[in-house]
Amino acid sequence: MKITIFGGLLVAALAIASAADAQSRTPVINRTHHRQERRITRDVRHGRITRMQAYHLRRDEARMNRDRRLALADGRMDRPERRHLRREERRIHHAIRRDERVDRVS
């Protein structure tokens, strides 16, 4: 009897935790962040951008991560917060491309 009650409570706790986590997950933002970090590292390794440019890009990424943590502080991310983060991601993406191209042109 105790095992079934404990098992039921465990399942209920996991269901509540996963429902709360579903509201705060940001898979697209996480994937984009990791992809951009790999691009920055690869571009430095191949000499497409300088270490100083990488420093500035990583600083922008850190700023975006701080904004993301603040957006998730209340447990969920609203549409305006998500829109702001996506806009920041696009800005960083274009900055990486711009830095790659500036070195190729000059």
Image (tube, rainbow, N blue to C red):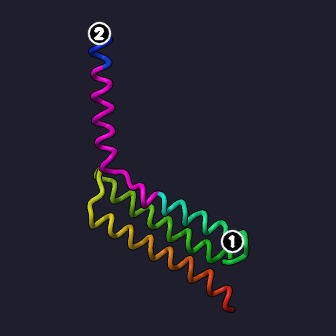
| Circle 2 residues within 10 Å: few <14, some 14–19, many ≥20 | few
- What is the span of residues highlighted in magenta in the rendered image? 8-30
The residue lying at 38 percent from left, 67 percent from top is: 85
Left or right? Give the position of 43 relative to 91.
right
Which mark sits nearer the N-terminus, 2 or 1? 2
Q: CA distance from mark 2 to mark 1?
A: 59 Å
State the mark number for residue 29: none
Q: Is 25 included in the stretch rendered in magenta?
A: yes
Residue designated by label 1 = 44
Left or right? Give the position of 53 relative to 68.
right
Q: Position of residue 49 (x, y in %)?
A: 66, 77
> Three-letter amino acid code at disc 2?
Lys
19 over 86 or under it: above or below: above
| Circle 1 residues within 10 Å: few <14, some 14–19, many ≥20 | some
The residue lying at 56 percent from left, 68 percent from top is: 58
Displayed quadrant of residue 56: bottom right
> Three-letter amino acid code at disc 1?
Val
Q: Position of residue 79 (x, y in %)?
A: 27, 63
Left or right? Give the position of 31 relative to 44.
left
